[in-house]
Amino acid sequence: MDDFLDELYPELTLETDDILMTLAIKKDYSEIKDFEKRKEEFIKDLEDFINEFSQTPESDDFMRYFDD
């Protein structure tokens, strides 16, 4: 099944000193022909994703992982 999803959704791995995150990209950005607009749309979607996640119980659960 994972092979099927790999073909359906391209994956992107983002890494900083603090976070390593792999994302499966479901949106087809090829419909946006202008490179800068496509990039802007993708960054906006990433920001929306982070903001949405920050409001979920899962984000609270994750922060509690670091409690003593």
Image (cartoon, rainbow, N blue to C red):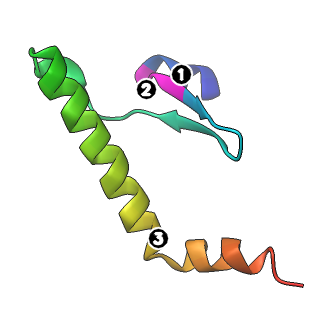
Q: Tell me whether circle 1 and circle 2 mark residues in contact (CB < 8 Å).
A: yes
Check the image and report above or below for 37 versus 50: above
- Find residue 9 and name its label: 2
Instruction: Identify the element where label 1 is drawn.
Output: helix
Looking at the rendered structure, the kind of residue marked 1 is Asp
Check the image and report above or below for 59 versus 25: below
Q: Earlier in the sequence, mark 3 or mark 1?
A: 1
Residue at image location 70% in from the left, 47% down from the top:
18
Describe residue 8's horizontal placement relative to residue 11 as left or right. left
The alpha-carbon separation of the residues under discs 3 and 1 comes to: 26 Å
Q: Nearer the viewer, residue 19 or 11?
A: 19
- Find residue 6 and name its label: 1
Describe residue 63's horizontal placement relative to residue 56 as left or right. right
Image quadrant in which the N terminus is located: top right
The alpha-carbon separation of the residues under discs 1 and 2 comes to: 5 Å
Residue at image location 52% in from the left, 37% down from the top:
23
- Find residue 54 and name its label: 3
Residue at image location 24% in from the left, 27% down from the top:
39
- Find residue 61 and name its label: none
From which residue to which does the magenta span run?
A: 8-12
